[in-house]
Amino acid sequence: MTSDNPLLPVGEAEAAAPDDGLMMDVLASQYRLSALAVADRLGLFAALAERPSSAAALASDRGLHPHGTEVLLNALAAQGLLVVHGDAYHPTATARAFLLPGTARYWAPMLALGWDERCTAVRTLVAEGTPYGYRGKGIWDTHNRSRHHGELFARAMHAHSAGPAAALAARLDLSGCTSLLEVGGGVGTYALALAGRNPRLTAQVLDLPVVERQAVRLIEDSGLTGRVRLRAGDMFGEPWPVEQDRVLLADVLSDWDDEGCRTLLGRARKALAPDGRLLIHQVLLDDSRHGSDAAAGYSLALAVMTGGRLRTLPELASLLAESGFGECVAAPTYGLYSLITVRGD
Ligand SMILES: C[S@@+](CC[C@H](N)C(=O)[O-])C[C@H]1O[C@@H](n2cnc3c(N)ncnc32)[C@H](O)[C@@H]1O
């Protein structure tokens, strides 16, 4: 990793516009009550008060899943309910005052009144290590089978990604590039923003067939037919076009476990032209993993819905190195988002 910044300075208009920080806070806050209620129901505050432990040790002692437990504990730490010394999680003074069963001010029964399906989803992740998706059914399989669910999600992602995509396109100079492959690109939000700013660029968007109807309409409405094209297919099964100047993974690696990420990164490397670069645009976790309530809550939401999670920059750098990439460069772009750039050769 180096500190070189591949981005242009922020323009005046972008600097003056609000980012989506508040929206991301609200999105992630959906998981605040569930994180607390699940930790209470699984007896985690009492266990950590008696013996502060690492996530792995706590999971092993209580028969929980290590990955789900770690994501949950970081969300609770980011909320101010746990504090971390070394790798051991301790309840904070607030958690000791209100969240220890049998004490006079034990508050959790009030919060437990809010138990809902999201709490069940978080408990499933922590107890079994499996994503809950849609009522226990996998998110992408559900989209493949139900156009309704798939199109709702694609529209939601377009709404969520419009700000980060525009911010990236305003600052990333692709004037020397002619080809971009966006993998897991949804309805083409990023590809359209980048092609709109770079007249020589032709972009292909690889995503599941369910996005096709909305993507085609959006490409037409943007006046970029012929320069932005959807390739409907399975990014794990279909061959990817090669000799690409840029491959973009925006909010994609955070949907997959390490093995899924390595597969995608290996395929990305093979798709790049000799001087090409892989671009990763997503929210990064700070190195502690619990410095931001919104990021730690978003990571919990991703784990519950998709089985993925957010990662720190060193974690991403090590996945990149395992996939044959060299040193990566990271630069903040918008809200919680960063661009990670790495050469393919
Ligand atoms: C979190 S969304 C990101 C969408 C877009 N990159 C953005 O940032 O708005 C993840 C995308 O991966 C796509 N996806 C999931 N599994 C896929 C697969 N096997 N093949 C192709 N696309 C897939 C989903 O349909 C979805 O559009």
Image: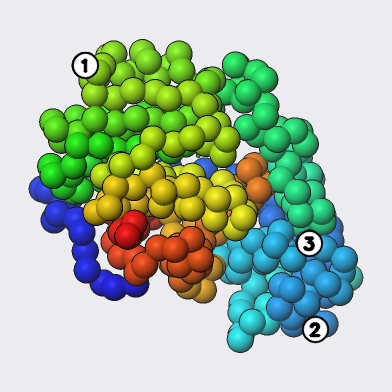
How many other residues sit within 10 Å of disc 3, few (<14), some (14-19) or many (≥20)? many
Quarter assignment of residue 48 = bottom right
Residue 334: x, y in percent?
A: 30, 51
Residue drawn at point x = 52 percent, y = 27 percent:
233
Of the two numbered discs 3 and 1 in the rendering, the one whose residue sits closer to the viewer: 1
Q: Which residue is mark 3?
A: 65
Label disc, if present, on residue 51 of the rendered structure: 2
Residue drawn at point x = 34 percent, y = 56 percent:
344
Q: Is residue 2 visible?
A: yes
| Mark 1 or mark 2, earlier in chain | 2
Residue drawn at point x = 66 percent, y = 48 percent:
307
Where does the N terminus fall, quadrant-wise? bottom left
Give the residue type that dot 2 points to. Arg
Depicted 52 relative to depicted 94: above or below: below
| Mark 3 or mark 2, earlier in chain | 2
Q: Are marks 3 and 2 in contact (CB under 8 Å)?
A: no
